[in-house]
Image: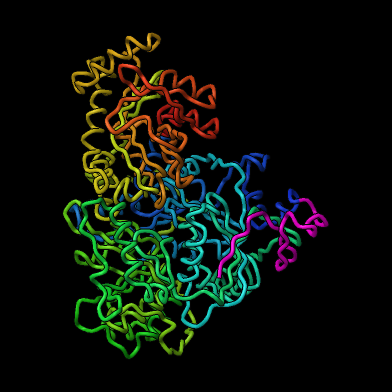
């Protein structure tokens, strides 16, 4: 089904794979020259401003954000001197579209976005019109171009656009005409052959790929380039559905070869001129190979609590007790040892029964997915028991076409509910199921709490990911888990017609013209970032949380869902930091912050944090060169591998505003989370994997930290403060000169202000 190469490969004429260590490879051009023939290399070279393809300084063509991230981005950019958007910037409102939580704060943010689009020359997409990525596909993507978005699923590679999801500060850099600085990434070929069998959809292919590459980090921070004869067997919508899920592999970005089907996509959307034919050169070199036989993919299910925890549906049904027991064991790690979590009680008569089915968002809400689901559910009924079924078309144009072609009627007659374009079911703010329920969803993630449960209140539900087709088949069986291949369905293959008037009549588009006379509308919950100080010569860190899960997601660092209503209030949102993972974190961090504030004001830090007296005493005796009056006091967390998941900068900024000055980890799950730490002036420490020299509550002294950052020290000495301080070493990994300066200044805002 899927095979990974243990070495680099050459791709000859788009079809012949030659391993780099083979005798045949010796007859080809050098791999250095062949590496320049990938699609990815060509696009990156065209956007690189450094003149050096080893260290890239990228300027993007367009930017896009949604309403969880754009307020913070705009406030940061405004504080840094923003006068006009230098490139097209689209503000969508698809995450906190429901203006029903927290009073007026959601709609206040929307009005902030609209007035900023007018003042600075942007595009504003009102709530319920489109999810961020569907609008970008329909209106922004273009062959050979690059888009940067403040959402991790910014992926438009199937349309020939290399897109990346990053934290907000990276968009701020683009808004200030700066660059996105990264080393040249590796490029891995995803070679597709064959074609999917009837009933298999894009989510099935995506989950199978994620299962094969996530755990081993095969494509981590690399570009996935989709090539091979199997590409032609897939429709544009199918490719898009696979492409958007590449984020869950932890790759940096994705790109596909393009053909007449992608050309037709642009023509349908009235943008024929934005198509570009893309394919690798005659001989292209790739750093790895993921070989996928599409004909062997079967309907998949990703069980809680990660898209990589995947099985075929047939495999799950044949081994229900063993697999469900394994998920329950994983729950003890993700949710806590004392959590009462069960799935085996959902087995009746040898079948797994689920309580909810949802097809939604940038992954599931596309036209073909919903039409196929409608074909399956047509003439069948979900029943009147506990099972519910909701569908969310990804945009109003898609919704309109479902109405016109009758698919909407098929859903409604079957008992399904059709809702407007909204990302809520994907991040825990829409269609929250009942306590103990299992929801099957064609969405992007099934991390803990993504369905909206509240662990601290004893409310626990979970999500399994499936393709829209198998969700519809399960709905047709009133909740009995069923693969779409078990249904004999004649798929109608309805043709899509895009109605451009829907956007023309509702979306505000400045056409790039800024109007400085527009007054920005500020809601009472929209707050400026608090002042942040520069890095001190020496640093005391208190460990305030210790997380030993194999991977820690950004959703665990700062929960999504209704907490995101406070996204425009840095201190308000920070109150939720680690609330579902370590409820004591906020109080501990605040106590450290109070001590640092006392120090900066010339007071006595130990008055706020009594144990500092003993810490100061030891440091004074053991480290004579440290001037305690000038030594910063901050908090840090330890996590084995933090940062998988969302690009939301709040996972880092919330720690920062609570007084955090560092993370310590064995490694970082994604480049974007590490970048978020750096952009908020936090030290991304890495240490060798093994037994920790410290524990939660310990104090760590890092003497000469400022000098170490300035002088690019390879290793940094740190000391656990005890009567006999214990030395250990950390590193900062590769930092650009700009990243070092940002850390020294204290955050990106300070860096630009200075």
- Name the quadrant containing residue 426: bottom left
Residue closest to the far right? 27
Q: Position of residue 523 (x, y in %)?
A: 24, 46
**Does the rendering let one see residue 692?**
yes
Asked whether 11 or 154 is in front, the reply is 11
Q: How many badges with numbers are in the image?
A: 0
202 drawn magenta:
no
Q: Quadrant of the C terminus?
A: top left
Q: Position of residue 361 (x, y in %)?
A: 38, 66
Q: Position of residue 2 (x, y in %)?
A: 56, 67
Residue at 48% x, 24% y: name it.
Answer: 716
Above or below for 656 versus 463: above
Asked whether 372 or 469 is in front, the reply is 469
- Name the quadrant containing residue 721: top left
- Name the quadrant containing residue 367: bottom left
Q: Position of residue 603 (x, y in %)?
A: 23, 15
Is residue 69 rendered to the left or right of residue 162? left
**Does the rendering let one see residue 62?**
no
Residue at 47% x, 35% y: name it.
Answer: 688
Residue at 42% x, 44% y: name it.
Answer: 641
28 drawn magenta:
yes
Task: Look at the image and give the residue range highlighted in magenta.
Answer: 1-30
Q: Quadrant of the N terminus?
A: bottom right
Asked whether 526 or 189 is in front, the reply is 189
Is residue 383 rendered to the left or right of residue 361? left
Is residue 269 rendered to the left or right of residue 438? right
Asked whether 494 or 730 is in front, the reply is 730
Display colour scheme: rainbow
């Amino acid at each position: 089904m899927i095979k990974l190469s243990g070495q680099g490969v050459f791709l000859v004429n788009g079809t012949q794979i030659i391993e780099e260590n083979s005798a045949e490879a010796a007859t080809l051009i050098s791999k250095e020259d062949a590496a320049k023939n990938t699609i990815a290399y060509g696009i990156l070279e065209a956007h690189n401003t450094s003149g050096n393809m080893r260290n890239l300084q990228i300027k993007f063509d367009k930017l896009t954000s949604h309403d969880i991230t754009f307020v913070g981005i705009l406030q940061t950019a405004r504080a840094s001197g923003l006068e006009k958007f230098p490139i097209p910037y689209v503000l969508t409102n698809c995450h906190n579209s429901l203006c029903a939580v927290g009073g007026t704060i959601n709609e206040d943010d929307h009005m902030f976005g609209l007035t900023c689009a007018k003042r600075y020359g942007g595009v504003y997409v009102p709530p319920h019109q489109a999810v961020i990525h569907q609008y970008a596909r329909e209106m922004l993507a273009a062959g050979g171009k690059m888009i940067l978005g403040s959402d991790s699923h910014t992926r438009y590679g199937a349309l020939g656009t290399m897109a990346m999801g990053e934290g907000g500060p990276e968009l701020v850099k683009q808004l200030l005409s700066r660059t996105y600085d990264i080393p040249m990434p590796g490029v891995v070929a995803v070679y597709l052959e064959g074609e999917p069998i009837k009933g298999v959809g894009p989510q099935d292919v995506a989950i199978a790929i994620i299962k094969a590459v996530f755990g081993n980090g095969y494509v981590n921070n690399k570009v996935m380039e989709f090539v091979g004869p199997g590409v032609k067997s897939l429709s544009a919508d199918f490719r898009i559905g696979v492409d958007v899920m590449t984020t869950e592999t932890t790759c940096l970005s994705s790109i596909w070869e393009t053909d007449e089907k992608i050309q037709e996509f642009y023509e349908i959307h009235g943008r024929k001129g934005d198509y570009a034919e893309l394919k690798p050169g005659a001989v292209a070199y790739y750093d790895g190979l993921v070989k996928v036989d599409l004909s062997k993919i079967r309907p998949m299910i990703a069980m809680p609590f990660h898209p990589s925890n995947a099985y075929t549906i047939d495999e799950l049904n044949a081994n229900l007790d063993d697999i469900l027991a394994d998920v329950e064991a994983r729950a003890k790690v993700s949710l806590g040892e004392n959590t009462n979590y069960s799935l085996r009680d959902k087995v009746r008569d040898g079948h797994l029964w689920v309580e909810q089915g949802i097809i939604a968002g940038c992954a599931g809400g596309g036209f073909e997915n919903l039409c196929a689901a409608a074909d399956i559910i047509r003439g069948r009924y979900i029943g009147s028991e506990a099972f519910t079924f909701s569908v969310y078309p990804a945009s109003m144009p898609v919704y309109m076409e479902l109405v016109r072609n009758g698919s909407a009627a098929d859903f409604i007659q079957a008992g399904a509910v059709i809702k407007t374009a909204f990302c809520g079911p994907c991040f825990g703010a829409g269609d929250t199921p009942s306590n103990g329920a299992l929801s099957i969803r064609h969405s992007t993630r099934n991390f803990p709490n993504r369905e909206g449960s509240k662990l601290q209140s004893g409310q626990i539900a979970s999500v399994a990911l499936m393709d829209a087709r198998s969700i519809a088949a399960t709905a047709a069986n009133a909740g009995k888990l069923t693969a779409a291949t078990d249904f004999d369905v004649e798929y109608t293959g309805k043709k899509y017609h895009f109605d451009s008037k829907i956007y023309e009549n509702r979306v505000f588009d400045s056409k790039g013209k800024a109007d400085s006379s527009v007054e920005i509308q500020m809601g009472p919950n929209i707050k400026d970032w608090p002042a942040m100080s520069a890095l001190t010569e020496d640093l005391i860190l208190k460990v305030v949380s210790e997380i030993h899960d194999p991977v820690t997601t950004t959703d665990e660092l700062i929960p999504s869902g209704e907490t995101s209503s406070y996204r425009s209030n840095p201190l308000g949102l920070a109150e939720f930091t680690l609330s579902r993972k370590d409820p004591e974190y906020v109080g501990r961090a605040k106590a450290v912050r109070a001590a640092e504030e006392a120090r900066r004001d010339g007071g006595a830090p130990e008055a706020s944090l009594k144990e500092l007296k003993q810490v100061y005493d030891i440091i004074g005796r053991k480290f004579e060169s440290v001037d305690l009056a000038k030594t910063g006091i901050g908090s840090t967390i330890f996590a084995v591998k933090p940062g998988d998941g969302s690009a939301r900068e709040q996972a880092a900024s919330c720690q920062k505003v609570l007084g955090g000055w560092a993370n310590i980890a064995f490694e970082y799950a994604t480049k974007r989370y590490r970048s978020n730490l750096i952009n908020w002036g936090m030290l991304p420490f890495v240490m060798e994997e093994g037994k920790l020299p410290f524990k939660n509550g310990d104090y760590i002294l890092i003497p000469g930290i400022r000098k170490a950052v300035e002088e690019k020290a390879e290793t940094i000495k740190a000391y656990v403060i005890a009567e006999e301080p214990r030395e250990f070493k950390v590193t900062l990994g590769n930092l650009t000169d700009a990243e070092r300066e940002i850390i020294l200044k204290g955050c990106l805002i300070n860096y630009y202000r200075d």
